[in-house]
Amino acid sequence: MARGLLMLCGALIGTSVAAGPRPVRPEPPATKPTSSFYKVFGGKNYDATADICRTKAGGYLITGRTNSFGNSADDMNVSIVKLDGSANVVWEQNLGGKETDEGVSITETRDGGALVAATSDSYGGGPDMKDIWIIKLDKDGKKQWDKVLGGNESIDEARAVLQLEDGHFILLGNSTKMATGKSDAVLLKLSEKGELVWKRNYGVELGNEEGNQLLTTKDGGFIIAGNKEVPPNKVWNFWVVAADKDGFKTWEQTYGGKQNDRANSIAATADGYVLCGYTYSFAESSHDIWVVKIDAKGQKQWDKVLGGPSTDEAQDVLVTKDGQILVVGYTDIYVPNNDGENTSTDGNDALAVMFDNSGKELWKKHFGGKGAQRVYSAVEDATGNLVLAGFADTETTDHLVVKMTSRGQMNGQ
C-alpha cells in the first residue's frame, strides 16, 4: 500500500503555470452595505459564478468562468472577482490558457488573499484531459502561485477547497481513469504553497463515485457529499462519506430510490447534516429538488421533495446562525400546452427556500424574467441577510449576486 501511495503522490505533484494576471480595477469608494440588492455584471460575452464566500472585512469573493476577456468566444477562463459589502467590484482577475478553464470553489486565505480551485483543459494533460488547477492570489488580486494536479491517464476535476486552522488546504475533486471510465472521489491535503501532503481515494473497484462538496468537522475530520452508483441497476444515489483528520474513511451512507438521485451540496446543522440536489426517484415528472436531513452518523431523519411538472434543482444549502436551512437553485417556468408540454420561453428562475430544522417550509422565493437565472451558491452576512450568487441571461450571460433578508425579502418587498 505504501508503494501505491508514493506512486500516486508522485503523479500528482504539480508544476507552476505562468499565466499573467490582468490589471485590477481601482477600488471603489467605500459604501454602506444595504439590506438587499440585485447586481448583474460582466463583460461582452459569458460570465457566470459557481461559488461565493464572505471575507473577514464584510465583502465577498466569487469565482466561475468567463469568455468575455479572452481571444475568442471559445477561450473560457477562470473568473475571480472581489466585491465589497454592496457587491461593487473591488478587483477582478481572469486567468487561463487557450482551452476551457473554470473556477469552481473559492476561499479567503489567512493572509487576506484567496485560493481558487479550478478545472483546466489548458494546462497539465492538454485539451480534453482536464486537470485540477489551484490558484493563490494576494489581497489585491495578484497571482502569487499556482499548481496543476492530475495525471496523463485520468480526467481530474476540482469540486471544493477550504483552508484549515493549521494553514493547510483541503481539496476535494474527482478522478476518472481514461482506460476504464471509472470515477473516484479524491481528497488532497496541501501545504500553504500547494505541495501535496497526502491524497485519499474514495471508491470501490466496481461502480463510480464522485464528490461535490466538503465540510470540516469539530474533531478535525471531514464530511464529503456526492453521488455513488448503487446495485443492482447502478443508479446514482446521494452519498455521504465521513473521514478522520488524516483522510481515512470512518463511515459512509447512501440515500435514494430506483432512479437517479444526485447530491450537489451539504451543510452542518446543530445535530447532523443536510444535503440537497435533485431526484428522479421521487419526482412528479422531470427531476425535482430533494432535501435530506441526516444525524451525525448518517441516519436519515427527514426528506422533502420540491417541484412541479418541469425541472427543479437545488445547487447549494446553507444553515443560518439561528439554525434555519436555506436551499438555493433554480426552477423552470412552466406554461403547459394542451399536451402538458412546457411552452415557456422564460427559462429558469432562481429559487430560494427556507426550512426550519424539522423540515417545515418557512418561505419560498423565486425571481428572474426573460432568459435564465440560476443560483449556485449562498452565504449569510454578519447581520443575517442572505447573499446568493449565480448567473443571469440578459443580452449576454452575466454574474448575478443577490442579497435578500432572512425572510426572503428584496427591495422593500
Image: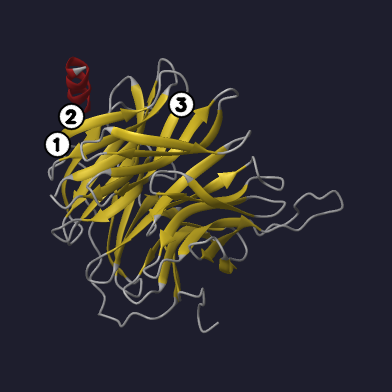
Amino acid carrying label 2: it is Ile
Q: Are marks 2 and 1 in contact (CB under 8 Å)?
A: yes
Nearest the viewer among 395 and 241 is: 241
Amino acid carrying label 1: it is Glu
Quadrant for residue 395, please give it: bottom right
Question: What's the residue at 50%, 46% (across, down)?
Answer: 300
Nearest the viewer among 154 and 124 is: 154
Q: Quadrant of the C terminus?
A: bottom right
> Taking the image as drawn, is residue 75 in sight?
no
* Disc on res. 294: none
- Which residue is under mark 1? 195
Q: Residue 48 in the image: state x and y as whole percent.
A: 43, 54
For label 2, the crowd category at 10 Å Cα-Cα, with few meaning under 14, some 14 to 19 and many 20 or more, is: some
- Which residue is under mark 3? 208
Considering only order in the chain, which callout, 1 or 2, is on the residue closer to the N terminus? 2
Q: Residue 16 in the image: state x and y as whole percent.
A: 16, 36
The residue tagged with tag 3: helix, strand or loop? loop
Quadrant for residue 372, please give it: bottom right
Quadrant for residue 172, please give it: top left
The residue tagged with tag 1: helix, strand or loop? loop
- Which residue is under mark 2? 13
Question: What's the residue at 51%, 73% (across, down)?
Answer: 408
| Left or right, residue 217 beside residue 271 | left
Question: What's the residue at 50%, 77% (across, down)?
Answer: 410
For label 1, the crowd category at 10 Å Cα-Cα, with few meaning under 14, some 14 to 19 and many 20 or more, is: some
| Left or right, residue 276 beside residue 372 | left
Q: Residue 58 in the image: state x and y as whole percent.
A: 27, 72
